Amino acid sequence: MILAGMSQGGRIALHFALKHPEAVAGLVLQGAPLDGFLPGPREDEAIPLADYAALVRAGRLDEMKARWAAHPLMGGRADALGGYEGRDLLAGEAPLPPIAGRLGEIAALTLVVTGEDDTPWRQLVSDALFYGLPNARRARPPGGHLCNISHPGPYNDLVASFAAALAA
């Protein structure tokens, strides 16, 4: 199977591939963070999850969405938040062990994608993933963190080409 994960989904995909290597032939990691990677994001790139959760708990979902849309990762794409209700914020972040030092254990062919305008920290993490994963390819399509939404054509072409190469 090819497992694709965007942002936090990429984080989960990495952990799954490490835990179940027999189930994953390929990974697509788009703008994924990496547990245990240092340095962490600078304050202007960090996601203020506790602040967002407090807004949701206070019934101020529209304000939370406006603040989230203004975050550098969102690139002003309020449309990407559509019917988002913030339930994950109320549940809290799932603590996962650091795996930055274990990337060499993931043998799956991996496409590491970061939009060319994504934040500097996400670029740095993606470079580390490319370097640390033994079978990684690197791609920087146009767009920011949401390059799959802002530039779906080039993004879909990358993923289709990767899947075809994996099938060959």
Image: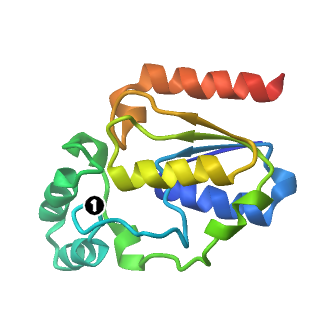
Seen from the viewer's position, the closer of residues 44 and 21 is: 44
- Which image quadrant is residue 43 in? bottom left
Q: Is residue 40 left or right of residue 37?
A: left
At a point 67% along the width and 69% down the height, the residue shown is: 101
Q: Is residue 33 left or right of residue 49?
A: right
Q: Position of residue 160 (x, y in %)?
A: 63, 23
Can residue 8 be seen in this snapshot? Answer: yes
Q: Position of residue 10 (x, y in %)?
A: 56, 53
User: Disc 1 on helix, strand or loop?
Assistant: loop
At a point 63% along the width and 56% down the height, the residue shown is: 13
Pick the quarter of the image with the C terminus. Answer: top right
Can residue 6 be seen in this snapshot? Answer: no
Above or below, 129 against 16 in this view is above
Pick the quarter of the image with the N terminus. Answer: top right
Which amino acid, by three-letter code, is at mark 1? Glu
Q: Position of residue 137 (x, y in %)?
A: 64, 36
Seen from the viewer's position, the closer of residues 143 and 8 is: 143
Seen from the viewer's position, the closer of residues 85 and 138 is: 138
